[in-house]
Amino acid sequence: MDKDKILSGVAASEGISVGEAFVIEGGGEFCPIKIEISKDEIKKEVNRYKEALGGTKKELESFKESLGKMLGKEHIGLADAYRQILDDPLLTRDVPRQIQSGVNAEYALYMVLDKVIKSFMKLEDPYFKDRKNDIEDIGNKIMGHLLGPQKRLLSDIKDGAIVVAQNLTLNDTMVMRERQAGGFVTEMGGKTSHVSILAQALEIPSVVGVKGALSFVKTGDTVILDGINGKIIINPDEGLVSNYIREREKFIVVRREYEKLRDLPATTLDGKKIELAANFDNIQELPFVMSSGAEGIGLFRTEYIYFNRSNLPAEDELYENYSQAARKTLPNRVIIRTLDIGGDKLNDPMLEYHRQCPTFLGLRAIRLCLKFPHIFKPQLRAILRASNEGKITIMFPMISDVHELIAAKKMLEETKDELRKEGHPFDEKIKVAAMIEVPSAAMSCDFIAKEVDFISVGTNDLIQYTIAVERTDEMVAELYDPSHIGLLRILKHIVSSVHSANIKVGICGEMAADTKYTGILIGLGFDEMSVASSAVGKIKKEIRSMSAVEMSKKVDDLLKITNIDEIKQELKKLM
């Protein structure tokens, strides 16, 4: 093997580690052999499957207990999320039905989960793609109980070892912490998989989605794991190892500095207060939000609960989800974004929309919700009811025209009338927000701002629509540029227009979580930033190190430059 072989992936949990590789062969996807069984064998096979399901539930209960002892009760939601998958009709109903068609339990399980896993792989959002790994993990656990006990290789790892595997489970992550592993590398997974979330809580450095890791890394190889930049270096020379050990020491010092800032406000040197909130996807992540130093939840994405099910979630289920977040986030607020999903991703027999369409430009988000009130109304009812439990702002995504916003607000008022008649209490003065994510909304945001209490800019979509770059297309990925002068001019126009309406404007998306752009966003005049909970510390440190007046002057001067080369030079200084 060549020296200093570098492999790239996704930085799932920040940190730097240097150690010997411990490679776990196998794992990942399963594809058992199909065995046809007779009618007389079906009942026995179904019972065998149910015993495997029960054994998996007991295994998760044991894991939940261990997790509670190690991290506290507030973190056991990770185990509860897996338990919810085990209770899903896909496993409790569909697999036994598949067995009754005359096949063995292993193959029936594979057939049911394979369909779900493939549907998740089609989703653009990396968060929802990562749910595929959770489902696959549960499938492997049940399969393990069907096939019998497997060898536990992780019990053999040494202190400081870098575990390399195709995929890992929540329990594997706990074992690595107990065995004091230096970190882990997987070929599968993403930053928002439950394994990655747990690794963040346990502060285990990790890089996931490293294609070819098992082909290049052998047990005993020296590996540098860079969980900050998302790469691993195999068999580096001594000089590089020394450099990374020094970087690890610096990282530890910086992390301690972030912890000192946890309870301090995100205020610039000249006194401008920025509301620094956290992005949030489901209730299991709440402990990380609470411990990050964020001022509430600036973007509660509500899509996860709609996936991996045969019917739409009931109003009460949505209410429990939203109200729990609202209660635990007090006295801070929660901004709940209504459903942002394409019609081709919902498995609802009442949804008469089955044509596959480009999710980015098709029937998505507010368009879908307005077209199908039976999907939208239960969510609005749940959000309103939950507003009685805490401080909630309701936010409508993908607004492209002020008339869409007015239509959404009209449906919200209709829902309020229904709840009043039924005697359900809610916040009568609940605030309403809109997301600016498309150029048409950006250029007409003065009209939109008159209809809401708050504006949030979703940079991920706004950048790709403004520059005409599909952000998931590797062929044009280098053109996806948050510092593009065209985008900066649009952002300045949005901020000025919104402030003219005497309301505040926030920003969410990956641009807000990147310290290279913090000064630019402060200079543009944003009042609020919502970022991943893991990024709160570093963004807060940046905010507290700069002057808002100085950054505003620099950005204003930048936007006046007409020579593109000069613009690039000034941008480098600002970044």
Image (cartoon, rainbow, N blue to C red):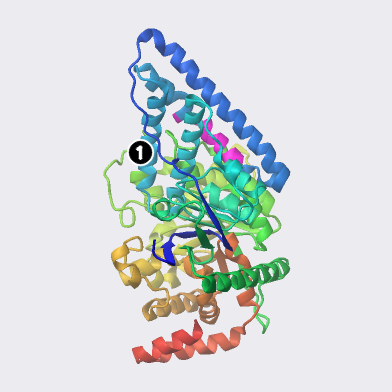
Tell me the residue at 36%/63% (across/down): 471
User: Residue 266 in the image: x percent, y percent?
Assistant: 66, 72
Is residue 89 at all visible to an observer of this figure?
Answer: no
In this figure, which residue is indicated by the disc labeled 1?
A: 351
What is the secondary structure assignment of the residue under circle 1?
Answer: loop
User: Residue 546 in the image: x percent, y percent?
Assistant: 62, 83
Could you tell whether 77 is left or right of 194 in the image? Answer: right
- Specify the quadrant of the image occupied by residue 264: bottom right
Nearer the observer, 452 or 242: 242
Q: Looking at the figure, which quarter contains the N terminus?
A: bottom left
Tell me the residue at 49%/39% (across/down): 137
Nearer the observer, 534 or 375: 534
Q: In this picture, is 440 found above or below 42?
A: below
- Specify the quadrant of the image occupied by residue 277: bottom right
Could you tell whether 206 is left or right of 75 in the image? Answer: left
Nearer the observer, 45 or 95: 45
User: Is residue 139 rendered magenta in the image?
Assistant: no
Tell me the residue at 44%/35% (across/down): 309
User: Is residue 85 rendered magenta in the image?
Assistant: yes
Q: In this picture, is 562 found above or below 529?
A: below
Tell me the residue at 65%/75% (across/down): 273
Nearer the observer, 385 or 17: 17
Q: In this picture, is 141 found above or below 333?
A: above
Which amino acid is tagged 1? Leu
Is residue 472 at all visible to an observer of this figure?
Answer: yes
* Segment colored magenta: 79-90
Q: Label 1 neighbourhood size at 10 Å, few (<14), some (14-19), many (20+)? A: some
Q: In this picture, is 422 found above or below 531?
A: above
User: Residue 59 in the image: x percent, y percent?
Assistant: 60, 31
Give the overall secondary structure of the magenta segment.
helix
